[in-house]
């Protein structure tokens, strides 16, 4: 029995079954490579689900954390605030796509940031309702699940959820949902289900993550911004997975040229350390009374040091531009594969920057999903030494999330494994 097999048995006996995992037990990692406890090497096209945009253990990030650890690891910002938190807030305020002067609060997870964004929006508007979208993922907390537009596995068996949450259609051209239809669904919702005067916020992912890496068309985001303005509704951009240079811009909503009222960040913000943020209009962020926001671990000093280093690395190493180049390489390779007669089950290739995905289908014309083939591909790729993730409301989408610091050699190695694995499951 291998060490991985032994640990898998121990996990089954000790860890809750609802905590789903792969069978790769990590021992060490470096940039875009990961080694398991049996010494097997993997190319990492998951990056901790878009957390390690700057790669595993980036030297500048590790040095910043080590230096902070020599000073202090925790004070609770509410008890003894510190300069690096303020400095990170200043830096995020300067770059976030929000209207006018901005302010920031730091917390720990993406879901926690979403929860606080909703709290802030309600406090600022005096309204309670929130409109999210089909296919959305906003976390596993109760409000996060209420906002999420995907039942399995996130919502099944956990209700009832918080009230005053509504879902409109998210545009998906591949599945026939146009921008016009999606905007019309919001208008219908405001006419039929909820008075616009009661809606505090829209919350939208500029590129849906768990929903299948579906980019919101620029026209849709601009239309959503216009609707928000027309009804006095705040716009929350959930940039948890798409932010921090992943799509070729620091924030994905920048592609549409819009400004949000609140921006939610996490994942790639701190290079592997748990940190999230809500950045928003100063007047909106200041609506909650003192003491209404925060948390014991919110803005942990080690994570804050990592985040300041991550911002440095993104700028110094040109990671926005690198994301564009990586995305072009991945997309071109996948499109060439989709043209092969033996790979007619590749139904769509899409994405922004280095946030790329492809759909697997039974019938390209009917676009019927092939979730079983997606499972086989992930497993085959893992056997060949590549970490892949699936997603999508129909469970048939493969998403590619290599670190933005990946070398061309390792990137091409991973793409070679995808090609070999696709050929293996085509038989």
Image (cartoon, rainbow, N blue to C red):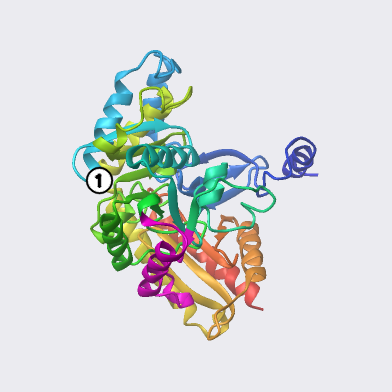
- Quadrant location of the N terminus? top right
Is 221 part of what is drawn in magenta? no
152 and 367: which is toward the camera? 152
Please say if 280 is above or below 211: above
Total numbered circles: 1
- Quadrant location of the C terminus? bottom right
Q: Main secondary structure of the magenta part?
A: helix
Locate residue 200, reporting x and y percent: 38, 47
Locate residue 33, reporting x and y percent: 51, 47
Taking the image as shown, residue 123 lies to the left or right of residue 28, namely left
Find residue 327 and report its image quarter: bottom left
> Does residue 201 appear anywhere in the picture?
no
Tell me the residue at 62%/73% (across/down): 370
Tell me the residue at 52%/71% (across/down): 359
Find disc 1 in the rendering and name its residue. 98
Which region shows up in magenta? Answer: 167-196
Locate residue 210, reporting x and y percent: 52, 57
Please say if 153 is above or below 68: below
Find residue 162 and report its image quarter: top right
User: What is the crowding at mark 1: few (fewer than 14 residues within 10 Å), some, or many (at least 20)?
Assistant: many
Is 174 part of what is drawn in magenta? yes
Taking the image as shown, residue 78 lies to the left or right of residue 324, namely right
Please say if 142 is above or below 347: above
Locate residue 182, reporting x and y percent: 40, 69
Mark 1 lies on a secondary structure that is: loop
Taking the image as shown, residue 320 lies to the left or right of residue 74, namely left
Find residue 325 and report its image quarter: bottom left
Tell me the residue at 31%/55% (across/down): 253
> Does residue 152 appear anywhere in the picture?
yes
Please say if 182 is above or below 61: below
């Amino acid at each position: 029995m291998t060490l991985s097999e032994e640990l898998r048995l121990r996990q089954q006996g000790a860890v809750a079954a609802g905590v789903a995992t792969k069978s790769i037990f990590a021992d060490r990692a470096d940039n875009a490579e990961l080694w398991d406890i049996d010494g097997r090497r993997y190319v990492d096209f998951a990056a901790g689900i878009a957390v390690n945009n700057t790669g595993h253990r980036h030297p500048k990030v590790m040095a910043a954390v080590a230096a902070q650890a020599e000073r202090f690891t925790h004070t609770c910002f509410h008890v003894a605030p510190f300069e690096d938190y303020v400095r990170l807030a200043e830096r995020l305020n300067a770059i976030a796509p929000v209207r006018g002067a901005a302010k920031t609060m730091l917390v720990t997870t993406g879901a926690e940031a979403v929860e606080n964004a909703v709290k802030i929006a309600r406090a600022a508007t005096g309204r309670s309702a929130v409109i999210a979208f089909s296919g959305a993922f906003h976390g596993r907390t109760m409000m996060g699940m209420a906002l999420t537009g995907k039942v399995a596995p996130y919502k099944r068996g956990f209700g009832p959820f918080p009230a005053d949450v509504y879902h409109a259609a998210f545009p998906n051209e591949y599945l026939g949902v146009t921008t016009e239809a999606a905007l019309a669904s919001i208008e219908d919702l405001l006419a039929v289900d909820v008075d616009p005067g009661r809606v505090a916020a829209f919350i939208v992912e500029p590129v849906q993550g768990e929903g299948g890496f579906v980019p919101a068309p620029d026209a849709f985001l601009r239309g959503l911004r216009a609707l928000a303005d027309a009804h006095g509704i705040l716009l929350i951009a959930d940039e948890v997975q798409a932010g921090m240079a992943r799509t070729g811009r620091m924030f994905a909503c920048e592609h549409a040229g819009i400004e949000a009222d609140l921006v939610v960040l996490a994942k790639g913000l701190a290079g592997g350390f748990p940190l999230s943020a809500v950045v928003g209009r100063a007047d909106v962020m200041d609506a909650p009374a003192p003491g209404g926001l925060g948390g014991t671990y919110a803005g942990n000093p080690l994570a804050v040091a990592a985040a300041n280093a991550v911002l440095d690395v993104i700028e110094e190493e040109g990671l926005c531009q690198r994301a564009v180049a990586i995305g072009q390489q991945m997309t071109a390779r996948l499109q060439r594969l989709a043209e092969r007669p033996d790979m007619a089950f590749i139904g769509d290739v899409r994405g922004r920057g280095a946030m790329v995905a492809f759909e697997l289908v039974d019938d390209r014309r009917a676009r019927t999903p092939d979730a079983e083939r997606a499972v086989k591909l992930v497993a085959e790729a893992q056997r060949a030494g590549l970490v892949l993730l699936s997603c999508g409301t129909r469970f048939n989408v493969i998403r590619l999330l290599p670190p933005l610091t990946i070398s061309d050699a390792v990137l091409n190695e991973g793409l070679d494994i995808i090609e070999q694995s696709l050929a293996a499951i085509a038989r």
